[in-house]
Amino acid sequence: MKYIVVSGGVVSGLGKGITISSLGRLLKSCGLSVTSIKIDPYLNVDAGTMSPFEHGEVFTLHDGGEADLDLGNYERFLGVRLSKDHNITTGKVYREVISRERRGDYLGKTVQVVPHITNEIQDWIERVAQIPVQEAEGAQGQVADVCLIEVGGTVGDIESMVFLEALRQFQFKVGEENFMLMFVSLVPVLGSVGEQKTKPTQHGVKELMSLGLFPKVIFCRSSQPLETATCKKISSFCHVPPSCVLSVHDVDNIYHVPLLLMEQNLHGIILDHLKLQAPVLPPDIGAWRNFAENIDKFTKVTKICLIGKYSTFQDSYLSVIKALKHASVAVERDLDLQWVEASDLIKPDKDDKTQPELENGETWETRELKHKEAWEMLKGCDGVIVPGGFGVRGVEGKIAAATYCRENKKPYLGVCLGFQVMVMEYARSFCDMPLANSTEMDENCEHPVVIFMPEIDKDTLGGTMRLGARDTLIEDFEGGGKSISYHLYGKKDRVSERHRHRYEVNPSKVSAIQSKGLHFVGKDETGERMEIAELSRDRHPYYVACQYHPEFQSRPLKPSPPFHGLLLAASGQLDEFIAKSENA
Ligand SMILES: *[C@@H]1O[C@H](CO)[C@@H](O)[C@H](O)[C@H]1NC(C)=O
Ligand SMILES: *[C@@H]1O[C@H](CO)[C@@H](O)[C@H](O)[C@H]1NC(C)=O
């Protein structure tokens, strides 16, 4: 196994993750298989209990691991599936060592950070690096050629010290030609003449060297391309040849970064140092290049409204936004994404005591104005997505959006809560259940259409969240005819997607709802859990929703099918797509 370790200095948020995923993408284009590990110097054991307000979306892995957006980026760029063990935290390592100490595995010896914690870290890395990476559905996994390791935090933090010490030992354990350290640094540009400053980089590298770690490649993050003089200066102070000081300046979109690294021969440098033979040279990166370049080039625009919570839009819906982007490139449209705050869709009424009180600076007039704007956006767009969400606030607004889309034949995709909203809306409008609600919002509601349905955990005998990949069986419409999802998923009748929820459609209400025309065309293996709902195409161009989160498996060159369907419908290309699929 060859290990590439990347650490960073000076400040966080440098785009270390993007640099590493791009590096991985480049190696993959050389025909090598790649896996990756993220080291986070936190005491948390998993991301499931962390607040989405503070940390953004909880990215769910195939095995149910709850991670943050970095593992999502690795999966998307490398096209692989990672597991919860691919994220090492201080908390996980300590927990392991302490439980071993409790079991008496250390034979009563004193247990210390060095060597016990540092050994545990090294064992963990070696073990996880050997987990076969599965590249595609059904494909045989294989052990990767190269393992990328990102060390979170910045060099010099107290928190990351123990990991750096473990890696210092590790380089000797695995040998010079199997280990390569790289460093991501910031090169600030100062003053009116735009002078590029090298001091922060020199400092960071010096700090690393004092810990016995010598970087072989230095990535310089900067707003402008690195000047030759700057490059030479960094080279001479940091003991690396100028060819190994790479410019990672700002580019139009993140998908250009692998190309940027390739132009500077990063793959050559790596293959050389690690004495690796690449099956494919020069790197086969054509399809990726097309994707990166096309993103900014389309002249036709598709407007999609995302209905959610305003304050946290960017971070909470990151994978949803990526999935929309991937799908829009596949249908050759520029994506114009508009945010609509769900609660703005409800008509303000000062006499209605259930409406939220005015917040700072707000008046009933400004609230009325926002309400009008929200509806204008909704009416003016080509398609609507209602993604997963949490909390009561906004649910009635999402229901109003679902009603509008259904009545006006506007393409609609619901995900998780967006699926439940669609089903509640339908039950209220067609099934004599005007008070249809979710017991998550209203525990004692009269028509519980969405209820608490945990999975039963055999070990703890308790109910748990439905988390990670589960199979969905795709069926025909009741009364005949293939569903839209069947075509979108490439005529498959069994698909595996990731879940993260506790509430589901109440099985006892399913036949009442389906008999009025909302078809549950996807179910779990027992037939008890509803996974996909659709209206038939003679009633609506695209009214589709799923309980699972398809966004987590969307890839730049392989968009998620339900998202692809939304963009096809919103750009008027779905009929053609389905006709082609039927004749294929
Ligand atoms: C790894 O897990 C820790 C602890 O929950 C979390 O703080 C961190 O964000 C996770 N990192 C990734 C890349 O998922
Ligand atoms: C559903 O429950 C929520 C939360 O209690 C409530 O605000 C809403 O009015 C209910 N909707 C209906 C139609 O009963």
Image (cartoon, rainbow, N blue to C red):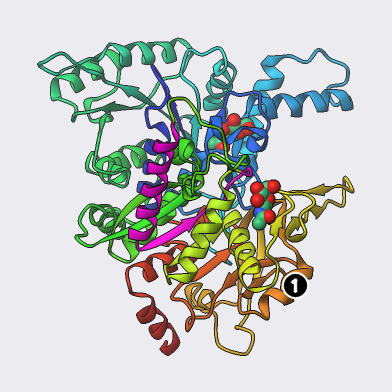
- In the image, what residue type sits under mark 1? Gly
State how many labels appear: 1
At label 1, counting other C-alpha atoms closer than 10 Å, the crowd grade (few under 14, some 14-19, many 20 or more) is: few
Q: Residue 548 at what x, y percent from top left?
A: 61, 59
Q: Which residues are magenta?
A: 363-392
Q: Residue 454 at what x, y percent from top left?
A: 78, 53
Residue 293 position (above or below residue 563): above
Residue 278 position (above or below residue 270): below
- Closer to us: 128 or 175: 128
> Does the magenta run of residues contain 96?
no
Q: Is residue 327 left or right of residue 72?
A: left
Q: Is residue 346 left or right of residue 508?
A: left
At a point 46% along the width and 54% down the height, the residue shown is 79
Residue 432 position (above or below residue 338): below
Quadrant (top left, top right, bottom left, bottom right) of the C terminus: bottom left
Q: Residue 495 at what x, y percent from top left?
A: 60, 69
Could you say whether the residue bearing mark 1 is in a helix, strand or loop?
Answer: loop
- Closer to us: 442 or 285: 442
Q: Residue 443 at what x, y percent from top left?
A: 77, 49
Residue on which disc 1 sits: 527
At a point 30% along the width and 57% down the height, the residue shown is 284
Q: Is residue 30 visible?
A: no
At a point 49% along the width and 80% down the height, the residue shown is 539
